[in-house]
Image: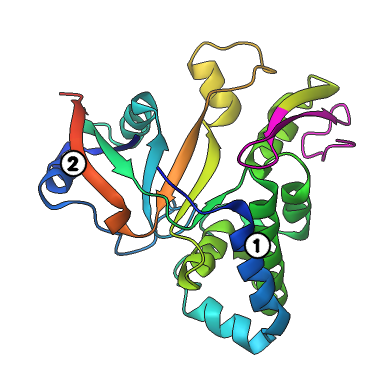
Amino acid sequence: MNSSTGSELLAEVRKYLSSATVADIQRDMASSDFDAYHGIGDPVTEESLACLEAPVAFSTQLVLSKVIAPKVHVSIHLFETSQSHTELVLCAYEQGNYEGMPLAS
Amino acid sequence: MAFHGTHEVVGNQIASNGFHLPGKASAEQRMGRGVYFWEGSQRAAQRWARKHYSDDKQCAIRARLKLGKHINLNILEHQEAFSLIAKEMLRSANGRSVSEGQVFNFLVNKGWIHTARRVHFWDEKQQFLAEGVDEPWATGPSDTMLCVYITALIEAPCIVWRSS
């Protein structure tokens, strides 16, 4: 399997957003099956995106908060920061909060 | 190598004619309109097929994938790209909700990605219990899911397992 490097996608997105208007984005949404795919996949919210930007993958974070957080105070993860580097991440949780976010990471 | 779980009838069609993108949206397409694989895990493909088809006529297909322009949601720069677009989609949606499948489709439609990768966790606690894992804090079974948006990137598909 081969793939492009990590920074190319981010550069393309930033370039697009630097000039795109709301009308441009709405047009691109409409032409990418927006209506047909309504509700498919986890909902995107400001909160979920904050999780995504935290150094734990979104899906991992959801499982951790729903399943593990009620039972433990902290968790440790290996996290890919790039295609060649992995870092150890420590997350602390609010005890008993099933929908809780990591308190620190 | 990557593995795709499906019904045996569909598997036979794929073995003869190759993969086709799904014609319509379904709840399973959490990363948008594409063909879904399990990275390096035939077991995951078998597990998925068993879960979705109950008539004991499931199969697993092995294929070689080219990733092309790729998004990996375990990589920070890719998470940032996904998040930037998703935020702008939310702001532009006039109060309508936005889901991850729609964001992936947007990235595909702009020509920015050909494939996507993310970790998949199997049904959280219910799945743990079904498998006899009684420690609720156990890091549950997970596999890496790959979604391919251009079928030309899928090479040499062949059936490697049949349940019947």
Judging depth in this view, the residue of B63 and B52 nearest the camera is B63
Amino acid under disc 1: Leu
Query: Vertically, is B112 above or below A50?
Result: below
Mark-to-mark CA distance, 1 and 2: 36 Å
Residue A86 lies in the magenta stretch: yes
User: From where the camera sits, is residue A71 visible?
Assistant: yes
Q: Label 2: how many residues lie within 10 Å, few (<14), some (14-19) or many (20+)?
A: many
Residue at the disc numbered 2: B11
Q: To which quarter of the image does residue B12 belong?
A: top left
Q: Nearer the viewer, mark 1 or mark 2?
A: 1
| Residue B95 x/y as whole percent | 70, 75
Residue stretch rendered in magenta on the structure: A78-105
Residue at the disc numbered 1: A10
- Quadrant in the picture for the C terminus of chain B: top left
Q: Residue visible at 53% across and 69% down?
A: B106
Q: Residue visible at 38% across and 56% down?
A: B34
Whether labels 1 and 2 belong to a single chain: the reply is: no
Residue A101 lies in the magenta stretch: yes
Query: Vertically, is A81 above or below A94?
Result: below
Direction from residue B130 to residue A13 in the image, left or right:
right
Judging depth in this view, the residue of B39 and B97 nearest the camera is B39
Direction from residue B50 to residue B67 in the image, left or right:
right
| Label 2: chain letter | B
| Label 1: chain letter | A
